[in-house]
Image: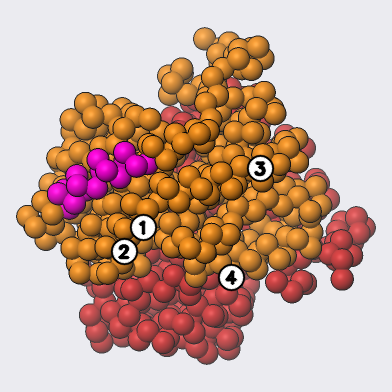
Chain colours: A orange, B red
Amino acid sequence: MALENLTPSDEQIKSAPNPNYLEGDYLKGVLEMTFRDGNPVAEKLVDEIFSSRQIDSIYLVGAGGSNSYIEPVKYILDKYCDLRIERINSTELETRRPKPVNEKAVVLLTSHNGETEDTVVAARWAKTTGAVTVALTSGHDSGLAKICDYLLPYSKELPGMPKTMIAYLFAAHFLKRLGNPVGAQLIADLEAMPAKLHDIKNAERERGMELARRYKDENIYYVLSSGILSALNYQYSICIFNEMLWLDASDIHSGEFRHGPFEVADPEMAYVFLMDNGENRKIDQRALKFTRRVTDKIITFDAGRYEDVSPLLSPFVIGVTWYWFAHTLSVLREHPLSVRRYMWKVDY
Amino acid sequence: MALENLTPSDEQIKSAPNPNYLEGDYLKGVLEMTFRDGNPVAEKLVDEIFSSRQIDSIYLVGAGGSNSYIEPVKYILDKYCDLRIERINSTELETRRPKPVNEKAVVLLTSHNGETEDTVVAARWAKTTGAVTVALTSGHDSGLAKICDYLLPYSKELPGMPKTMIAYLFAAHFLKRLGNPVGAQLIADLEAMPAKLHDIKNAERERGMELARRYKDENIYYVLSSGILSALNYQYSICIFNEMLWLDASDIHSGEFRHGPFEVADPEMAYVFLMDNGENRKIDQRALKFTRRVTDKIITFDAGRYEDVSPLLSPFVIGVTWYWFAHTLSVLREHPLSVRRYMWKVDY
């Protein structure tokens, strides 16, 4: 079958469902539930795994959005513990078969529905190595959950933030176990996050919508970030712009910008900056300062606007700001975020 | 000063120098010299470092092209040794300050001229940790060389492949020292590479030029690869397209393609596939197969065309094929690869 036959008509696109997860107190409710249900499970799981054997490395494995959502956990664990932490695409894990994936490794595999073929294949291989396998998924009876030794579950309500929160809880309980005070602090911060994020998403509403109105006609976006946000620009680029809005995009580490990518900047180009509120802020600011000399088309989503939120929680703050923008953009472009032409439809 | 005043005029752009490193036997000569001079230095340096202390991790540090050029070394060392290997952007090393960067770490920092500000700053910080620092550079008296404990030098002739070859020699001698037969084999393969690559670049000449003629008018390119080539699509995207040709581009891991980025594919879109000749080939092929159903605009640079070359050497093979394409594209677009508007000109 020719693939163009799979592309929905304009009418079908316009009439596709386009839920706005930020309306009312839906997000707050889901995140409160996620913390309440997930916190004891994460604690128990960390205890069981790390009391039963010596662990030298943790592999964080996923594909697409799930791959990028877990990068902040690498950032946090790299910063506060001595284990070897790797984040790797699911197919690449299975082809590369890293030597340290053995009895001394935890392999945490994530997929929202738990049926992502590439991740299921990766889990199957990881099992053969003797590594401890953990399924981070809302698919509690899924292929992934069935293969793995442990299940780190969350509800089906939302694909993004609950997964991130549970992954954070895994890292936090591990650090707490090591006696690092960052662990207990992170757990307390995560518990406070739903209410705090509720206020932030209300505060960001008008600004996110206004940015969408101003930039709705751009056809390519360069998305920059660094530090704990350095996989979120990737997610924004490949999931929001490419996958959901069918727009061109490229993600650039803001520390790499001056070493090549900035040569393409001109007054017509649109940039999205995800600003860190931690030690990488100076890198982002330097890139932003340059870009302002070239173009006025700059969208900033800035975790620094909320100084009472720990820089380790920046991905949550950025998440609500960009969702207002993305959702509004999809409404104005009459292209709901839920429409796909190839995903889940074509043999691959 | 307004930045537009820095952009050269059309006439200045057209008349800029645009050397073709692939003409005659220049490349062969440079690589022969690189191996001859670099091999004993790499061997001695590896001996000195690894006989003097316990090393647990190796950090590969650079910015832009230098950042991506060293990724294959992470791939090789991940595959054949147990050390923790990290590749990280220079600024991010200095802001993130990873815990394992200490007396038990080797930090290999690379910059072609050795004066890249971000990398010099990173080296200065690494020195304070007690880590062994190594400067991989052609700037033998540069800031970077002066800061670091060791110098892994190459000549100024070419920025790309000699650096890669020296980095490979570092990895190969380390593996040899560990008693892994891959080390000695890699050294032999690298010695044979200049002559072999000379033949390959002659064989690829017409095809590379023809591809440039066919695709000279594209304005955005999506560049895909995986495995040992998985930083080369990044390099192609940010260095060749963005920096040198001022064209839009985005780099996608071919294992991530189906998880979002492929939704943007349509018959008008141009794709560049860098095909692995090792275990990741199946991932690349799967992405290629899908893309062929959507568009005819597909450029493949395929290490699999040369089966007598070890898959570990694929980056060298891809390097010559793409250079014919890039150079010819720059001629046809009257935009020499040497022209910059911001780099080395603006405060940043």
Magenta: main secondary structure equals helix
> Range of the magenta residues?
A31-46
Residue shown at the point (75%, 60%) measured from the top left: A292
- C-alpha distance separating marks 2 and 3: 32 Å
Q: Which three-letter amino acid code belongs to the residue tagged 4?
A: Lys
Could you tell which of marks 1 and 3 lies nearer the N-terminus? 1
Q: Nearer the viewer, residue A275 or B218?
A: A275
Q: Residue A206: which numbered mark, if any?
A: 3
Residue B32, percent from left and from top: 51, 69
Q: Which residue is mark 1?
A: A189
Left or right, residue A126 beside residue A236? left
Chain of the residue displaying label 4: A
The one nearer the camera, B287 or B208, is B287
What residue type is disc 2 on? Gln
Q: Nearer the viewer, residue A129 or B277?
A: A129
Q: Earlier in the sequence, mark 2 or mark 3?
A: 2
Q: Nearer the viewer, mark 4 or mark 3?
A: 3
Q: Earlier in the sequence, mark 1 or mark 4?
A: 1
Q: In the rendered structure, are the residues bearing label 2 and label 4 in contact, judged by CB atoms less than 8 Å apart?
A: no
Give the percent coordinates (x, y) of residue A273: 62, 54
Give the residue at mark 2.
A185
Q: Are marks 1 and 4 on the same chain?
A: yes
Q: Residue at x 32, y 80 (%)?
A: B102
Residue B279 seen from this side: no
Q: CA distance from mark 1 to mark 4?
A: 24 Å
Q: Which quadrant of the structure image shows residue A134?
A: top left
